[in-house]
Image: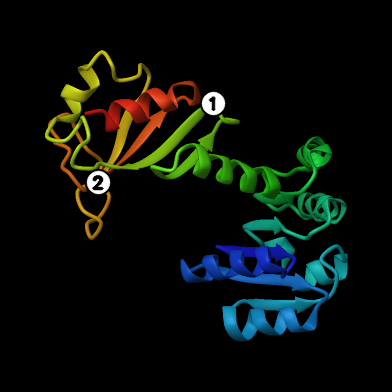
Amino acid sequence: MYVLIGGAGLVGLNLAQKLVEIGHTVAVIDIDPNACRYAREQVGAMAFEGSAVSTEVLLEAGIRKADSVAAVLRSDALNLAIVTLAKHYGASHIVSRMRHRDFEQPLRFAGAHHIISTIDLAVSTMVNAIEYPQVESMMHFEQGQIEVLKLSIAGRCNVVGRSIAEIAQDPRFPTGSLIIGYQPHPQMDLEIPNGSTVLESGSTVLIVTKPGVLHQMIDFIEGC
């Protein structure tokens, strides 16, 4: 996949690094020559020095052939311009960073398929870390209507030694929730469990649930 990134700040360079690591061809655009040099020499991406909202630079960087375009400049207005131009040149997938919510609808109208609010994401992550310290990670889907949490199973936990089918039939297990992933030990791969999978002490589970029952779910998993 050919990915074009507008902006080579911390977000842009780290995004480029991750994409290169998983095998994508990446190009970044930035007005800072040092950032472009770093992208070439340290990240392994192509880099084009100039404005990411310049049609000349965008065409030189290959926006017409890009499978995905990411607008990650610090300015929402400039990201809006990148999104608009990307849509104009036929990009099939457009992602944009957003700092202020006032730009959400304009970005969607301009053609952004995914909008990532960096401030909301950071705040939400910190709130979860404070409120649910026992949860290793948490992801939100459908505007926060669904949560996927990663939770370690300690020796004292209520679910140790029980099968997933038995757990699902327990009336205390929150309705509408589902255990979708199981990692027996940190050194082992994550697997998709079935009803006969028995949860072991020291293992990790991925659980799909609803925000309103997060406390109930954690209390059930950890209860003695």
Quarter holding the C terminus? top left
Residue 97 in picture, x, y percent from top left? 71, 51
Residue 132 sits above or below residue 184 on the image: above
Q: Which residue is mark 1?
A: 145
SS class, disc 2 = loop
Q: Which residue is mark 2?
A: 191
Q: Amino acid at mark 1?
A: Gln
Identify the residue at the far top of this view: 171
Q: Amino acid at mark 2?
A: Glu
Residue 146 in picture, x, y percent from top left? 49, 29
Residue 204 sits in quarter: top left
Residue 13 in picture, x, y percent from top left? 64, 70
Q: Nearer the viewer, residue 45 or 210?
A: 210
Dot 2 or dot 1: first in sequence order is 1
Image side of residue 144 versus residue 181, left or right: right
Q: What residue is at 83 percent from the left and 51 percent from the top? A: 76
Q: Nearer the viewer, residue 216 or 166?
A: 216
Residue 86 sits in quarter: bottom right
**Label total for image:** 2
Which one is closest to the eye, mark 2 or mark 1? Answer: 1
Q: What residue is at 22 percent from the left and 35 percent from the top? A: 157
Q: What residue is at 83 percent from the left and 50 percent from the top? A: 80
SS class, disc 1 = loop
Quarter holding the N terminus? bottom right
